[in-house]
Amino acid sequence: MFKNIIDAVTGGGDKQNHRQTVKGTVVLMKKNVLDFNDFSASLLDRLHEFLGKRVSLQLISAVNADDHGNGLKGKVGKAAYLEDWITTFTPLTAGEAAFTVTFDWDNEEIGTPGAFLIRNNHHSEFYLKSLTLEDVPSHGVIHFPCNSWVYPASKYQNDRVFFSNKTYLPAETPISLLKYREEELENLRGDGKGQLQEWDRVYDYEVYNDLGNPDKGPQHARPVLGGSTEYPYPRRGRTGRAPAKSDPKYESRLNLALSLNIYVPRDERFGHLKLADFLSYALKSIVQVLKPEFESIFDKTPNEFDSFEDVLKLYEGGLEVPEGVVKVIRDNVPLEMLKEIFRTDGERFLKFPLPQVIAVDKFAWRTDEEFAREMLAGINPVMIRSLEEFPPASKLDPKVYGDQTSTITKEHIESNLEGHTINEVIIERKLFILDHHDALMPYLRRINSTSTKTYASRTLLFLQKNGTLKPLAIELSLPHPEGDQHGAISKVFVPEEKGVENSLWQLAKGYVGVVDSGYHQLISHWLHTHAVIEPFIIATNRQLSVLHPIYKLLHPHYRDTMNINALGRQILINAGGALEVTVFTSKYSMEFSSMLYKDWVFPEQALPQDLLKRGVAVKDSSCPHGLKLLIEDYPFAVDGLEIWFAIKTWVQDYCSVYYKDDESIKKDAELQSWWKELREKGHGDKKEEIWWPKMQTREELIETCTIIIWIASALHAAINFGQYPYGGYPPNRPAISSKLVPEKGTPEYDELLANPDKTYLKTFTSQFKAVLGISLVEILSRHSSDEVYLGQRDTENWTSDAEALEAFAKFGKKIEDIEEGMKRMNNDEKLRNRYGPVKMPYTLLYPSSEGGLTGRGIPNSVSI
């Protein structure tokens, strides 16, 4: 009896005394809670549950390995099951459900749990958000963030594994978890074979061989981008679809109606809220299906606006839709999108929100000051550079393109330099250029063979005493009619306030807007954010375990990117897609972006390096961040530098938790594999470039991660979410020109004299393309209701490391302080470039936002 009392107190005796139960809470979202409900799935899941086909979980030990032929994997506990599935009802709108699970715990066998296996024996998938263990002996609460779709067990070769929120470098991983860590990465890499299915989780690389559709005819063919010196490109995610029938080097296309089903790894697909938002607003882009019907709506001059007042009707009254068009809409538009076309708020179809650029003053956008200000605070503020030689020279090969030197002379501009000479303002670094000459000239002859008629352009600007830029001259150039080797044929326009010279000057500014809009959409936006970041997403998921600190650092900045890029390839940048219809480069759009990828240099994507390269900043140790801006009131650069260095400080603080010296970087096997694969496969067409960081030092890691986060968050925000505020009014940011400058003695010139506004609108703004363009930028400029912004995470318990959590909290507070500073600057009337003649404050780098069309907010990722 005495022995029994001692055993009861000490836990000795029978091994059963080591056993007890541990309660857990599983948070998940059933398939049937999505907006598009699958009622049969819900019923079948309940039937499976009733028949004993349940959802099981097994804890994996982080401290005790099974050495009996199991590869030293951690010991696995007894299966436990989600409780009360049948009686736990979830609302028929999006929502989470919590389930209890009770584990039979053996402290000697399992010890500390470091992971768990889950097996879904139901009919349908569910979204597993987290598992939380309560009152684990000697440990208290243990969190397992999951955030992943779990499909029925029949879809997998092995049960899914999820790890706790502890962070381990590869060499520091407990031996019992190491094999699970390695196997999970192998699963994510796949075998490179076959067509990938909805439930697959495979991340793999492919070239852009899915833009053209040669099976529809040669006019639908486009070059394969990537894998060649002629057309280099970043890689995109592999889908494994069958090759095209007419040409096996192309991948077959999905039917337009199946666009939402394009493969990306399941966890990269939009969440339910994002999908609902996207579908609602994506409707308007479908007007391309209805082109003939919409053209019939328009008045006596089909496809043309007769006046600026006509354009304003798009925002004031909308367009009434005849019954015949309504029938076409019903026949062509998926049911779930119709709630946007037949609004319940009484609005007529095609009534757009009023863009900010005309909200205060309908015509201030036409001023020279606003034209120049948008190069500093508009949607493409990454192009302007200091002019260090006059006249502007060309870097194009003179053997191929002849003499491409600018024809702008001193006589064109010296009268507007506040009494200075050309040499003086160049020495004083007050002369700037927006140069779209060299990039465009090699493609211009082909582009102008389409319905587009436009020019390569150079725009010279002078920094005035009041801090604003004054446009001095615009040069518009065409290839020589007798051949490229003869150089360019150029015209120079200078500011004039009255008469036909003023009308020509307004046209010249419009052509600059066309070229800048196309460059912005194809290069600054698509190529330099969307396309270049996708290989980082693929490499990270293939080579960095979820346990790895750098995975945890970068993962929030990848959210939704692969999905939006896949949709882009399906309906936006493909042959005949919305971009080819709305941007001046037409069918040459994507190969044009391939040509510009040749100039992409990863280290120069760092904002300080970019500003130095463009000559708009110089190093100065006496200035904040060691940089002096030559244009002090340069809103993108001023706000961007604050955000850049906040990100870099956060990355530095975080990396310092895990890497104490350079040697730890070199010894990190996963990190080295990640960086090697990124260079050699993800950006494989640039693998021989000497500028790639070697990833041998902490500083290289910190700078690399800062660049990745900057591109995905702040850079994308700065060039994306202003698209509707500025470009939602097409005359301000025209994207296509259909006529060249009218020549004296022609009917077009006479019309310019008689009605310059109508000539401007006929040149740049056709009704159908304007409506399609507005529709497109409205979609691209909206924040979804579930967006996660810089300084935030969607999972509270993303790591168990207190130092990392503390550093992140510090980062979040810094981001809030920076936003308050931006607001103060926007109230400083001396900073004229922050609001301009249009009285539109610069908010594109405000970190926070609500959902919708706000013109502000920095999402963590390229999510739209």
Image (tube, helix red, strand yellow):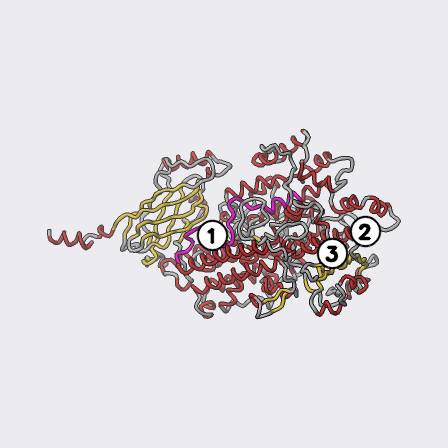
Q: Residues within 10 Å of mark 1 (few under 14, many from 20)?
A: some
Kind of residue at badge 3: Tyr
Place of residue 859 in the rendered image (x, y in percent of width and height, measured from the top left): 54, 51
Q: Mark 1 = which residue?
A: 793
Residue at the outermost left position? 1
Q: Which of 596/839 is in front? A: 839
Element type where label 2 sits in the image? loop
Q: Residue furthest right?
A: 745
The answer to whether mark 2 and mark 1 are in CB contact below 8 A is no
Please, what is the three-letter code of the amino acid marked with disc 1?
Arg
For label 3, the SS is helix
In this rendering, which labeled residue sits more in front, label 1 or label 3? Answer: 1
Nearer to me, 193 or 115: 115
Q: What are the residue bounds of the magenta stretch?
A: 774-801
- Residue type, numbered disc 2: Lys
Q: Evaluate if marks 2 and 3 touch, with contact meaning CB atoms under 8 Å apart.
A: no
Reading the image, the residue beneath label 2 is 498
Residue 185 is at least partly visible in this image: yes
Disc 3 marks which residue?
443
What secondary structure predominates along the stretch shown in magenta? loop
Total numbered badges shown on the rendered structure: 3
Q: Is residue 122 above or below residue 545?
A: above
Label of residue 99 in the image: none
Q: Of marks 2 and 3, which one's residue comes earlier in the chain?
A: 3
| Mark 1 / mark 3, whichever is N-terminal | 3
